Image: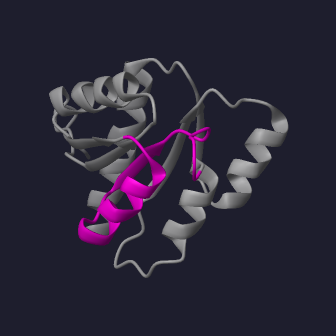
Amino acid sequence: MADPVHRPSLFVLVVDDFQDAADTTAAVLTLSGHDATAVYSAAEALKRVEDQSYDVILLDIAMPGMDGCEMVERILERPFSKRPFLIALTGCTTEPDRARVAAAGVDLFLAKPVDPAILEGILDRIGRFLETAQA
């Protein structure tokens, strides 16, 4: 049985062109014990995933230049020893948006604004899953 106090620490990349949102999300996750980094474009995120393995990538969909769906498609073209869990954290909430995000390969769709406690609960579950898978 899992220790209810134990919180797995995850490597998280937060991708959002709205810097305040990205920085705030990364700060909240860092305070929760995760190693979270914020970047402000899909292109910057692609550079980061070349150099660092992430457990989770939280991403906005509507970004200038390359949007989140194209970014996900490019990420998933890469070989991984462990594939990151992809979570869309976005204001794009129509059914066509959801279908497009799912088709791109995103694992979970969350509409902005998301309650930090809900996000932390999701990350805790992902962390526990990863610990179990690695055991």
User: Where residue 33 sits: x, y (%)?
Assistant: 15, 35
User: Where residue 64 sits: x, y (%)?
Assistant: 57, 42
Whether residue 20 is visible here, answered yes or no, is yes
Q: Quadrant of the C terminus?
A: bottom left
Going by the picture, which residue comes out furthest to the right? 96
**Vertical position of residue 65 compared to residue 27: above or below:** below
* Residue drawn at x 43%, y 82% as measured from the top left: 79
Task: State the residue in front, 33 or 36.
Answer: 36
- Within the image, what quadrant is residue 77 found in? bottom right
* Residue drawn at x 63%, y 26% as measured from the top left: 91
Which region of the structure is painted magenta? Answer: 40-66
Whether residue 135 is visible here, answered yes or no, is no
**Vertical position of residue 93 compared to residue 104: above or below:** above
Is residue 49 part of the magenta span, yes or no? yes
Q: Is 93 situated left or right of 70 in this image?
A: right
User: Where residue 2 sits: x, y (%)?
Assistant: 24, 44
Task: State the residue in front, 65 or 124.
Answer: 65
Task: State the residue in front, 115 or 70.
Answer: 70
- Within the image, what quadrant is residue 122 found in? top left
Q: Is 128 situated left or right of 92 in this image?
A: left
